[in-house]
Amino acid sequence: MFAMTSRLAGIGWSFFALAMVPTLPVAAGAQESRPASTVGDNPVRSPRQLAEQLAAVYGQRLDQVAYIPALPLVAKLRLSELTGVPKYAEEVDRVVAAFLRGEKTPVPKSGSEQAGHLVFAELAQRAKGQDRDRWIQLCRNAADQIFDADGKPLPIMPFHSEMSDAVFMAGPILAATGKLTGERKYFDAAAGHFASMRTLCLRADGLYRHSPMCEAAWGRGNGFPALGLALALSDWPEEHPSRQQLVGEFQQHMAALKPHQDVETGCWHQVIDHPESYDEYSCTCMIGFAMQRGIRRGWLNRTEYQSCVDRAWQAIRDRTSADGQLVNVCAGTGKQKTLQDYLNRPAINGQDDRGGAMGLLFATELLEVE
């Protein structure tokens, strides 16, 4: 039944659409992977159209500087830049105004909060003078957590929790801070962090286990390393001695992921190498983003990978309604003890901030090449 629902879901997408999408999590084994309700009304939405629809729903506030509310703001800044429409950047400016004025100065207490500081890095890239200095200082508040009291880099960023998520939670903010400040120490520290995460979580077959507690290659547990390394490499200096090694490791991970994309749906699965598990929205966005970024930056061969991105995009477009309802976003997941625990994680249908963040990020990355 598990495998059948996933397979049957990919049949006849052009002939029907759901009447509605439930908004509550349902048991993973009972969740069908089907397109969202309004797809039949607009089956050929462009990345810009989908990004604008998601931007109307997600990225409205930043009560906590964490990656889920921060990434839609990053995407909105890029959306304004790419479309020439200022309103998205203006919305971000209103959301972050208290941080710029100094009324809020967060200090991360988790990996998620470290990654949330990426919005400040994105703002710093576009700012000048005192505003730029302020945003950079906020980035340092996160990135400097990798240094001890004597200023020496720790082998791994605090709050990593032994989970592959930490490739994304720490790597990109370290690289972004290094680029903004011109200080090599942040790249050196990031390289050490990546090495530690590989030791903890990289399997012999090139996929990431979510944590040493279990060998399961959780979907988002591979999406995080894919997205994290793609973002970090985007800021990595050509002359840094670890660059070529990191590019090679990125390529190896993409090559390991490629054959596990579902040939019928275009998605990657809740557990990457278990096709009987459900098609999962967020990891498909993250992997699709990483592959598109790799193609655009010349790290991946377009002939080999563009079809993967195109199929992932069709899958995400078909699973995203005009009002931001999504299909099969895995609920928040800490490290689990068994494969079955990952297979049993609930899938969320409806509006979901985590999935919306990743969908918006993927759409804006595709908009870069339109």
Image (cartoon, rainbow, N blue to C red):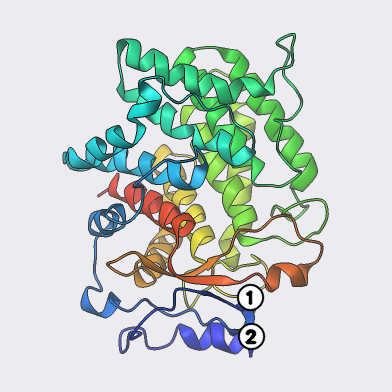
Left or right, 223 with reference to 105: right
- Tell me residue 201's x, y (percent): 75, 47
- Tell me residue 266's x, y (percent): 47, 70
- Secondary structure under tag 1 reads loop
* Residue type at tag 2: Phe
Left or right, 351 with reference to 232: left
- Tell me residue 370's x, y (percent): 24, 50
- Decide: is 186 above or below 251: above
Q: Residue at x 36, y 82 (%)?
A: 20
- Tell me residue 105's x, y (percent): 49, 24
Q: Residue at x 29, y 66 (%)?
A: 323
Q: How many marks?
A: 2
- Secondary structure under tag 2 reads helix
Left or right, 207 with reference to 278: right
Q: Which residue is mark 1?
A: 277
Q: How many angstroms separate mark 1 from mark 2 (CA)?
A: 7 Å
Q: Which residue reaches farthest left? A: 85
Which quadrant, please, contains the N terminus?
A: bottom right
Q: Quadrant of residue 92?
A: top left
Left or right, 54 with reference to 169: left
* Residue type at tag 1: Ser
Q: Residue at x 22, y 58 (%)?
A: 49
- Decide: is 59 above or below 93: below
Q: Which mark is residue 292?
A: none
Pointer 1 with pointer 2, Cβ within 8 A: yes
Q: Which residue is mark 2?
A: 2
Label 1 crowd (10 A; few <14 / some 14-19 / many >=20): many
267 or 2: nearer the viewer: 2
- Mark closest to the chain's N terminus, 1 or 2: 2
